[in-house]
Image: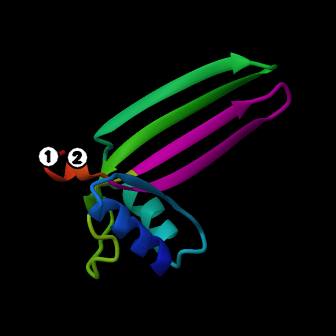
Amino acid sequence: MGTQRDIAKKIVDSGADCILSVKGNQGSLEEEVKTAYKQQQSVFDNCIVEKGHGRIESRCYEVFEKGIIVDDENRWANLTGVIKITSIRELPKKTETQERFYLQKTVYLQSQAF
């Protein structure tokens, strides 16, 4: 996980933005994000629904302020937000739901309040 933070720091230091996937192999980070986002309302959300190939796919995007993660150790310097994507695939005989989380490091947003 340290390598991912190092790479992200280099990207942000160069003036670019980056979004990092939150995965189960990152210690307590995934559980921390899943627990914390439930305590705040998103600052942005949008849903897209697509139909075709015998299925309906919905993707809902939510952006949360960085304050939902307590980062006392400053593990994620320049973190500006957390993104949650909920994907729902409705097939003829079953429905699949998947939630994914991302850490957002956005240079542009650092100079603006949410």
What SS does tag 1 mark?
loop
Membership of 91 in magenta stretch: yes
- The amino acid pointed to by label 2 is Tyr
Q: Residue at x 60, y 69 (%)?
A: 24
Which quarter shows the C terminus?
A: top left
Residue labelled with disc 2: 108
Q: Give the CA separation, mark 2 to mark 1.
A: 7 Å
Depth check: give the residue in front, 27 or 95. 27
Total of numbered circles in the picture?
A: 2
Q: Quadrant of residue 88?
A: top right
Membership of 95 in magenta stretch: yes
Start and end of the magenta stretch? 83-105
- The amino acid pointed to by label 1 is Gln
Give the image location of residue 28, x and y in percent: 49, 76
In the rendered image, is residue 38 in sight?
no
Q: Residue at x 50, y 54 (%)?
A: 101
Mark 2–mark 1 CB contact (< 8 Å): yes
